[in-house]
């Protein structure tokens, strides 16, 4: 399981040292990711997280029925890769940090298969989604390998790195 840090404070602040801690935690985790939950409960109607993904982190393709999500990149560059129902990539949204060539915020308001491709050694972003969080509500397609299938994940990641649209 990735490192997850839960907020218990009424006011939470995230600065440079906390981001460094988050990146260190992601680098040490087998799944190569970590998050700080800014919300205080899985029941909150707004779920906000600061997420660190290492470049080799596998984010299984998934979709969220009846939910939205948005990302705001803080560090690094990512692509959100979208797929049709057969697993063919059909769109890529590229994000970077403010001041760069790429947009730095995206919002998804549809039930579309998607995954995240990290283009830099590490990427950190602020994710906001609608709650409450219910484990198992995300859908995962049959064409995507399970995180426990090392060879399938390797092949999928190779395919994901090669996507250019």
Image (spheres, rainbow, N blue to C red):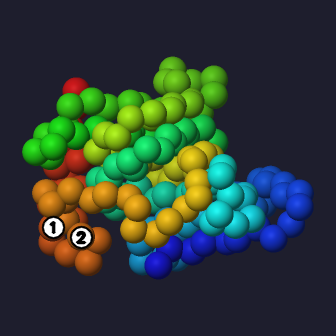
Q: Residue 100: percent from the left, percent from the top?
A: 57, 24
Q: Name, please, the residue furthest toward the left.
A: 86
Relative to the observer, which residue lies in front, 62 or 27? 62
Relative to the observer, which residue lies in front, 46 or 107? 46
Query: What secondary structure is marked by label 2?
Result: loop
The crowd level at tag 2 (other Cα within 10 Å; few <14, some 14-19, many 20+) is: some
Of callouts 1 and 2, the N-terminal one: 2
Q: Which residue is drawn at 22% across and 40% down?
A: 83
Relative to the observer, which residue lies in front, 16 or 93? 93
Q: Distance between the residues labelled 1 and 2?
A: 8 Å
Task: Determine whether 154 is above or below 126 in the image.
Answer: below
Q: Which residue is drawn at 52% across and 49% down?
A: 123
Which of the two discs, 1 and 2, sits closer to the camera? 2
Disc marking residue 146:
2
Disc marking residue 152:
1
Q: Residue at x 32, y 53 (%)?
A: 62
Residue 56 visible in this rendered orientation of the protein:
no
């Amino acid at each position: 399981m990735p490192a997850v840090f839960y907020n218990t404070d009424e006011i939470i602040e995230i600065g440079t040292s906390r981001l460094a801690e988050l990146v260190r935690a992601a680098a040490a985790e087998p799944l190569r990711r970590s998050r700080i939950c800014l919300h205080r409960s899985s029941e909150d109607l707004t779920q906000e997280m600061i997420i660190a993904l290492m470049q080799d982190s596998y984010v299984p393709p998934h979709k969220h029925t009846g939910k939205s999500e948005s990302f705001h990149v803080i560090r690094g560059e990512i692509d959100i890769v979208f797929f049709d129902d057969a697993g063919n990539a059909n769109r890529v949204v590229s994000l970077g940090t403010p001041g760069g060539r790429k947009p730095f915020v995206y919002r998804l308001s549809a039930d579309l298969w998607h995954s995240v491709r990290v283009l830099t050694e590490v990427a950190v972003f602020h994710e906001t989604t609608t709650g409450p969080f219910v484990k198992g509500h995300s859908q995962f397609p049959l064409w995507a390998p399970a995180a426990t299938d090392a060879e399938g994940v390797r092949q999928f990641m190779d395919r994901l790195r090669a996507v250019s649209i």
